[in-house]
Amino acid sequence: MTISVVIPAYADTGTPPILRALENMDYPQDKFEVIMGIGSCPAAQRNHAVKQAKGELLYFFNQDSQPKPDAFKKVVGILNAQTGVAGVGGPDLTPQGNNYTQQLFGYAMSSYFAHWRMRARYAQIGRERVSDETELILSNLAIRKDAFEQSGCFNEKLYPNEENELINRMVGKGDKLVYSPDVIIYRDRRKTLYDFARQFYGYGHGRMNQAFIERGAKNLLFFMPLILLIYTLALPFAGASWVMNIPLWTYVGCALIDALWLSYKHRKLLFFLLPPIYCIMHFSYGMGMTGSLWTRCTKQKRGNSVSGKAITSRVLKECR
């Protein structure tokens, strides 16, 4: 099966980690090509690059994705072994070489309490299975080209969460997408607490934008951080009622239990470190959702668009 690797980039300079990783893929070099979409809107960049793609399979990576050498073989094996599969994705893991702070962020992102089903994006969870947007991530996602085009490509008004909205459309029309814990890439985690908070702020911002584009919330679980934020802000005005504190203590208790479990699982002292990181994840996400609402109210009148700048694509490697 021929593969078109699609990578968005902000500038046509340097050699991103993904290009070095692709040199070591355990797959015939003449059976995959590499196309880089250059611009400032990743959704539009990917769509533009796909127009030049010749492969039967589109494999979407980020610039910093570092796939295991067997990733292509595993994905193609799944597609050939099962009928009706439109795409395959897997987890985005923390490299062993990341520093202690980055490892902490990786543990938090793979936490059951902090991330629920979404933790499968950042850890090898369970077995190969049919899945959806809650477990699949665009830094490690392969989709048959014909299924991608029939679904209408990425919505260029949306970033991030463009893959979430696309996956919902694909699943809605009956396409089957598979999550495999063995299709692995590695990506460096954020290096500072500020960058980590900004990351989740962006995720929350994208989720709210997605809800508007889809004209409703398909999964209310994603709105729990917003509810938590509103609840916390309302607490000082609730008086001395102990009933109002029950959700707070439940949250704290669950966070501590989860951190204790991860401390035991990884044989590291994480009990006092992870709960504050969980709070940062959840509050930043909720603030991102409110930020999206504010942006929509203040910019929609000016017709603001995500994909307003020129996009170009460059074929870095051709397949035959």
Image (spheres, helix red, strand yellow):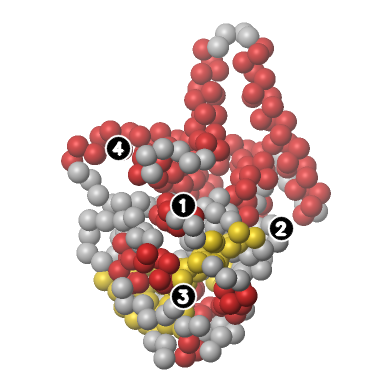
Based on the displayed image, in which of its 4 quarters is residue 307 positioned? bottom left
When the figure is inspected, residue 239 is found, relative to residue 291, above or below; the finding is above
The structure residue drawn at horizontal position 69% and vertical position 27%, both measured from the top left corner, is 250
Q: CA distance from mark 3 to mark 4?
A: 35 Å
N-term-proximal mark, 4 vs 1: 1
Residue 197 appears anywhere in the view: yes
Would you name the residue on which mark 1 appears? Answer: 172
N-term-proximal mark, 3 vs 1: 3
Looking at the picture, tell me which residue is in the foreground, 146 or 158: 146
Q: CA distance from mark 2 to mark 4?
A: 38 Å
For label 1, the crowd category at 10 Å Cα-Cα, with few meaning under 14, some 14 to 19 and many 20 or more, is few
Looking at the picture, tell me which residue is in the foreground, 155 or 188: 155
N-term-proximal mark, 2 vs 4: 2
Kindly state the secondary structure of the residue where label 4 is placed. Answer: helix
Looking at the rendering, in which quadrant would you find the C terminus?
Answer: bottom left
Would you name the residue on which mark 2 appears? Answer: 126
Residue 111 position in % (x across, y down): 67, 47
When the figure is inspected, residue 224 is found, relative to residue 138, above or below; the finding is above
Kindly state the secondary structure of the residue where label 2 is placed. Answer: loop
Residue 183 got which mark?
none
For label 4, the crowd category at 10 Å Cα-Cα, with few meaning under 14, some 14 to 19 and many 20 or more, is some
Looking at the picture, tell me which residue is in the foreground, 144 or 232: 144
Residue 276 position in % (x across, y down): 63, 38
